[in-house]
Image (tube, helix red, strand yellow):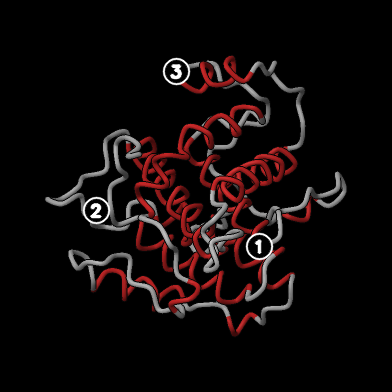
Amino acid sequence: MASPHAPSQDATSSQVPSQQVMGTVEEPACETGQVVAFRRVRGRSTPPRQPFEHRLARAGLAIAAHVVEASSGTAPNGDGVHAGTVVGILATLAAEAGLQAASVNRREAVQTAVGGWVYGGAADVILFQGTQQGGITTVWDFIAAAAVEVGVPDAALPDLDVVLARAEAHIGVKPYPVLTVPPAHRPRTVLRAAAARHRHVVHAFCADEGLCTAHEHALALGAAIAQVIRTEEAPGLLANLAAEVLVGAARLAPMPYAVV
């Protein structure tokens, strides 16, 4: 697997779909809770004001590079990185951030059923439906734009209505989420557990760029998935995998802590 490459300063703006972003903060100001603690541990000062799209792109690049490095050894031959594993982890993290953002927007916790199942699609507007419901940039916008950029036809992108219907029909069934991509491209790790291990690093990289809200974290993770899709073979399959994990993982509550 190729390492995600750094975008040029001029290229970063093209990586963020030009739509409205709900709840964004133009000036870095992560000054509460654990995010500040992580920034201090990393020894970073508050970054200067930068365009929001540039900060999203930089955070996405840093997150992608971290998960790629941490996934070393997941390739079939044991030497290298399995792209499907990286995309699966990033998409699970994005779904978790979407659920957290939905809780903030509703001013109440997203309700879960026995077994951690989440009903009602609380995070769907943030993850993939916002474009149709008011022109809000979603996580899926980043993924689809990257796939098309590297030559995947629009018609070859997954039908999210079909993905959603399949995910809803299989709530409560394991293994979950339901994946239709070929087995060779499916993640080689337990995604919720892997996501929990990387969660604090995602928060730290986002704080470095002044991305303070869960919605902004979700978009940064969309930028990270896009970065991987741009640099890997089979971008259409990876986009399909990202869609299936993104929609499915938003129907399971995140693990509360990392499992080593």
Report which residue position mark 2 lands on.
Answer: 118
Q: Establish if 141 lies above or below 31.
A: below
Q: Which residue is mark 3?
A: 33
Q: Residue at x 47, y 53 (%)?
A: 89
Element assignment for label 3? helix
The residue under the point 65% across, 64% down is 229
Would you call the spot at circle 1 few (<14 residues within 10 Å), some (14-19), or many (20 or more)? some
The answer for how far apart the CA atoms under marks 2 and 1 are is: 33 Å
Q: Is residue 209 left or right of residue 118?
A: right
Report which residue position mark 1 lands on. Answer: 1
Please state which of residues 119 and 94 is positioned toward the viewer in this rendering.
94
Q: Of helix, strand and loop, which one carries label 2?
A: loop
Where is residue 186, by image quadrant? bottom left
Above/below status of 162 relative to 8: below
Callouts 3 and 1 close, C-beta under 8 Å: no
Q: Nearer the viewer, mark 3 or mark 1?
A: 1
